[in-house]
Amino acid sequence: MFSFRNLIRPYQGMPKEIYVIFVARIINALGCFVMPLMTIILTQSIGLSKEMAGFYISLTGLLYLPAALLGGKLADHFGRKRVILFFNGLAIGLYLLAGSMKPSLDLVYVLMFAGASMTASGPAHDSLIADLTNPKNRAGAYALSYLGWNMGFAVGPVIGGILYQHHLPWVFIGDASTALIALLLIGIFIPETIHKAQVEVIEETRKWERREEGSIFSVLAKRPILLYFSFIMFGYNFAYSQWSFMLPIQTLQLFPQTGAQYFGYLAGFNGLVVMLFTPIVTKLAEKTPLMRRMVYGGLFYALGFGMLGVLNSLFFIFLWAFTFTLGEIILAISVTPFIANHTPASHRGRMSAIVPTLFNLGHTLGPFGMGKALNYVSLETGWKGIGVSTLIFAMLMGGLEFYERRNLRAEINPEVESI
């Protein structure tokens, strides 16, 4: 079952542009130094309290929201590739500027806008993949892109953690350099794809992808399942945001001298698990409905994050990191295809912005909320609360799966009585 040929089968037969994106993602992630070290930079290098670090991380997330919406709208009107080239190029310039600055709040603001620029190109990346694929190969294409990122991420944060100890400016310069190489690959080898979104979808199985007129809000009103889905994913992302907020604080608390380095190892371990297990999980899940997969992902989150409040020696931290990383893999290969399969081709950029914007509020508010909570409860109690709340959201995802199946049955047989 797990022969090499079987494991790579979901990634075969893709358009060549998908493989270029895969390589670009590897290179970009090899230099992903800033993002996983953000909490440590704020607390150790700049000297902010845990509460203020949480505030700035959440403020950064709030800046990402309008950036994503702007990027999505521009991607639908001016093209996917143009948006990627402009905003990623701007981010590269800002990271190079950060490399010449001393640790201060001014540095924080530059990093905030660099991250927002990268975020603005995100909907264009997702739309590019959706334009190049169909429901049969779309999940595999997104899984390959995710795998590429984590192949690089298995190494990048480890290097970043080492550089942080003695060469902080190179954290920013290295991030900019790899982003530039990845951007050149996209610029040279991938053509503009917005014209593909103008081709009418005629397959009955893809009726939700048919072009529509009107605003993104009118399109969303016809697809309430995406709004319910966003609410549940909000809860999942609130939990996952603690991977980059509470977990580095915990490693610094448990290991004062080597916490930053251990967290770099954890981030690298996360990428290594993704690299090794994404093909296996993709193969195991290929016949499982997308919504059911996301129930399983939530259960892995609940166990992995919740148990950090019960058993948190170094061995168990790595064990629970392995557990919630399995949940991350399941969700990563399922969430974006689910959105794309319910989105009109005419609104891919905007939908790839607004739906993730809604559920990424959980990631935005997570550090601020838990930063406040840690003034009153211990890290262990905070982790237990995260575990319980995520379990509730996983149960809600199960209810949403039932709702989708019922609606599908009603479409096939309109005489079926509603429950």
Image (tube, rainbow, N blue to C red):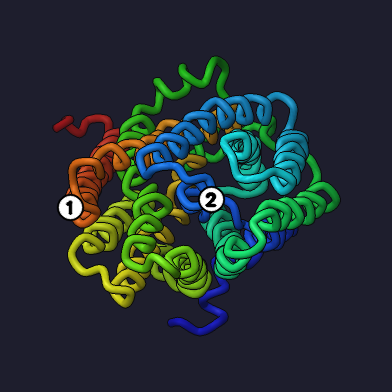
377 vs 82, left or right, is left
Against 134, is 74 above or below? above
Q: Which labelled disc corresponds to residue 45?
A: 2
| Image quadrant occupied by the C terminus | top left
Which quarter shows the N terminus?
A: bottom left
Kindly identify the residue that appears in the image at 36 percent across and 72 percent down: 318
Element type at mark 1: helix
Front in this rendered view, residue 205 or 356: 356
Q: Quick check: 52 above or below 216?
A: below
The type of residue carrying mark 1 is Thr
Label 2 packing within 10 angstroms: few (<14), some (14-19), many (20+): some
Q: Residue furthest bottom?
A: 3
Report if the CB atoms under discs 1 and 2 are less than 8 Å apart: no
Give the labeled residue for mark 1: 381
Residue 126, how many percent across, how many down? 60, 43
The answer to whether any part of residue 15 appears in the image is no
Residue 320, given in percent of the width and then of the height, sits at 31, 68
Question: Residue 341: x, y in percent?
Answer: 49, 41
The answer to whether residue 68 of the structure is visible from this angle is yes
Label 2 secondary element: helix
